[in-house]
């Protein structure tokens, strides 16, 4: 996992008015917290932060006011519900070698068994514990040949070295459902015929 370097500035203005002024300057207000230290209120360059956050659980190397360097991962990101721009970000302070609990996106690969089966993602992301500088970007699960009724449990997902589950190992991640669209359509047609006869 690569580090993304971002220059941040400490901020002294707070409240909605200050946040609006920060956003007008194409910047994003945020807070860095963790390790028992006082929360540090920061301002980030909007475009750089937006690009960094495209990677889930990105490791951010912060250059704060050109003086201190800290490592952080995103904890909470608030976006404008309509336009999608960043409104605020909370970052969690981490140290090299430290274990953190994060959610890793799960990707399915392969083809289900023939027969119009449907794949349901019960968990879109799997909670795991990993070293802060070695967080996997995604986990891949093979669904090749799975039939209706089959499930992939958390313990079935191959994890990289040093990564452990932070969820019950019997939690269902993916399950295969039988397609029911044809049966429902036939039932509706029979119902319409009965109504026409009445």
Image (cartoon, rainbow, N blue to C red):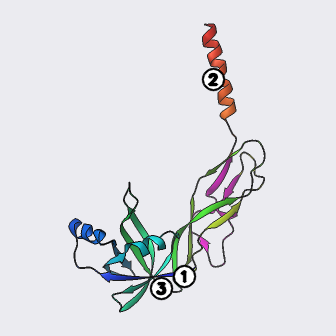
Kindly identify the residue that appears in the image at 70 percent across and 41 percent down: 178
Which dot, 2 or 3, sits closer to the camera?
2
Using a 10 Å C-alpha cutoff, classify the residue at mark 2 as few (fewer than 14 neighbours), some (14 to 19) or many (20 or more): few
Label 3 near label 2: C-beta < 8 Å? no
- The foreground one among 163 and 14 is 14
Residue matched to label 1: 133
Q: Residue 181's x, y, as percent?
A: 66, 34
Q: Badge 3 is on which residue?
A: 95
In the figure, is residue 160 to the left or right of 16? right
Is residue 173 depicted above or below 159 in this figure?
above
- Toward the viewer: 28 or 74? 28
Rendering coords of residue 95 (x, y %): 47, 85
Q: Counting residues from the N terminus, which is met first, the one under dot 1 or under dot 2? A: 1
Real-space Cα distance between discs 1 and 2? 55 Å
Between 195 and 51, the one nearer to me in the picture: 51
Q: Which residues are magenta?
A: 151-176
Q: Secondary structure at mark 1?
A: loop
Question: Marks 2/3: CA distance?
Answer: 60 Å
Does residue 105 lie above or below 194 as drawn?
below
Q: Residue at x 22, y 75 (%)?
A: 13
Q: In this picture, is 24 found above or below 174?
A: below
Q: Disc 2 or 3, which lies upstream in sequence?
A: 3
**Helix, strand or loop under label 3:** loop
Look at the image and tell me in which quarter the C terminus lies: top right
Q: Residue furthest top?
A: 198
Q: How far separated are the C-alphas under marks 3 and 1?
A: 8 Å
Q: Which quadrant would residue 148 be assigned to in this image?
A: top right
Residue, disc 2 = 188
Q: Earlier in the sequence, mark 3 or mark 1?
A: 3
Task: Answer left or right for 70 relative to 162.
Answer: left
- Secondary element at tag 2: helix
């Amino acid at each position: 996992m690569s580090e993304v370097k971002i220059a941040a500035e400490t901020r002294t203005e707070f409240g909605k008015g200050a946040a609006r002024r920060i956003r007008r300057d194409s910047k994003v207000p945020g807070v860095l917290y963790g390790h028992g230290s006082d929360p540090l209120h920061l301002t980030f360059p909007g475009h750089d932060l937006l690009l960094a956050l495209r990677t889930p659980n990105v490791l951010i190397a912060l250059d704060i006011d050109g003086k201190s360097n800290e490592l952080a991962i995103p904890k909470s990101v608030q976006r404008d519900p309509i336009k999608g721009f960043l409104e605020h970000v909370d970052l969690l302070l981490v140290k090299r070698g430290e274990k953190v609990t994060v959610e890793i996106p799960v990707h399915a690969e392969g083809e289900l068994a023939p027969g119009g089966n449907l794949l349901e993602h019960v968990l879109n992301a799997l909670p795991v514990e990993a070293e802060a500088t070695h967080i996997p970007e995604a986990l891949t699960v093979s669904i090749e040949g799975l039939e209706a009724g089959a499930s992939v449990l958390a313990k079935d997902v191959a994890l990289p070295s040093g990564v452990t589950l932070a969820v019950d190992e019997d939690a269902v991640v993916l399950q295969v459902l039988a397609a029911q669209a044809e049966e429902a359509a036939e039932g509706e047609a029979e119902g319409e015929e009965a109504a026409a006869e009445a």
